[in-house]
Structures are given as C-alpha cells and as structure tokens.
Image (tube, grey):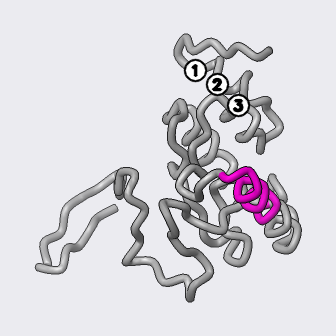
Amino acid sequence: GSVVFQNGETVLAHVIMHCTGYKYHFPFLDTNGEVTVDDKCVGPLYKHVFPPALAPSLSFVGIPYKVLPFPMFELQSKWISGVLSGRIKLPSKEDMMVETKTIYDTFEALGIPKRFTHCLGIDQVRRISVTNVSPCEAISKRKHIKCYLS
C-alpha cells in the first residue's frame, strides 16, 4: 500500500505504526465521548481492548503497561482479528460494560487511583485470558519466555 501525506508526497508502506508512548491522548479519534482519558485511564475498555459501546469496530492494542509487551500485544491482535473475523464472539455490549464497571468500581473501593487501571504487572497472565489458548501457554511458546504460575 501507500501513504499520502498532507503535502502530497506518497510513500510505499507495508506497516503503519502509531506510537504514543504512555501518554494516552487521541486527538485524532472522535468517539462522541464514548472513550475518554481520565488520570491515564482510557475507558471504558473491556479487557483493556474494546470500548463496549463501539465494539468491535474500535479496539486498542498496547494500552496495558508493566507487561511482556510484544507477547501481550500479539495476543491482543489475535483476539481482535478473531472477533473481526467472527471466530470469536464478544459478550453483549451490556455484559462488557458491567464487567468493566465492576473492575473500575473494585479499584475505586480499594483506593487504587485510575492511573493504575492499565498497570497489569504480575497479574497480566490472568487478565489476558481472552482466547482459547491459555495466556501462559501462548506466552511461554514465544522465544524462550517461561511462565511460572503458582
């Protein structure tokens, strides 16, 4: 494919990668308020990927941090492609919102600031279980990464 810039220049491209780092800011994305950023929390996002009101047509890859980034993002991408192809079915928008709100409410009740919503750390293996392959199995198959679960 090709990319055409505002100045009219065209370049051939096989991949377009938009990297924003960990400053969640999407000025190019108009969601009519369905997706917001508040204290570094992008939400609401079902399992850090799908905004319930806009799923499956909008998804995010790479929001979580303190993770094994490339295996996690690969699994997120495979989940998204499975959903878009019809191989994987998402819960209803209502069920996704209830689950997401429950997690957000639990964090709030525990006094965990919103900015830690996407900090998965050691909990990432449990929280990325979205495919038919166990996350531990999927991650451990990647380039000598071993997964230890208690």
Q: For the N terminus, give its image quadrant.
A: bottom left
Pair 1/3: label in front: 3
Mark 3 and mark 2 in contact? Answer it, CB < 8 Å: yes
Q: Is residue 94 left or right of residue 130?
A: right
* Residue farthest along the bottom direction in this orientation: 32
Residue type (three-letter) at the residue carrying disc 1: Arg
Q: Residue tagged by mark 2?
A: 139
* Nearer the observer, 61 or 132: 61
> What residue do we see at 54% from left, 74% from top?
36
In this rendering, the answer to whether 138 lies above or below 115 is above
Residue drawn at x 59%, y 33% as measured from the top left: 121
Q: Residue at x 80, y 53 (%)?
A: 87
Q: Earlier in the sequence, mark 3 or mark 2?
A: 3
Q: Nearer the viewer, residue 69 or 112?
A: 112
Assess disc 2: are there few (<14), some (14-19) or many (≥20) residues with their C-alpha within 10 Å of its C-alpha. many
Q: Amino acid at mark 2?
A: Ile
Position of 136 with respect to 71 (left or right) is right
C-alpha span from label 1 to label 3: 14 Å
Give the amino acid type for the residue marked by disc 3 in the picture: Val
| Quarter-of-image position of residue 52 | bottom right
Q: Nearer the viewer, residue 64 or 79?
A: 64
CB-based contact (under 8 Å), mark 1 and mark 3? no
Q: Which residues are magenta?
A: 100-111
Q: Is residue 122 magenta?
A: no
Q: Position of residue 105 (x, y in %)?
A: 77, 61
Count neighbours of disc 3 (C-alpha within 10 A) and say few if under 14, some if 14 to 19, many if 20 or more: many
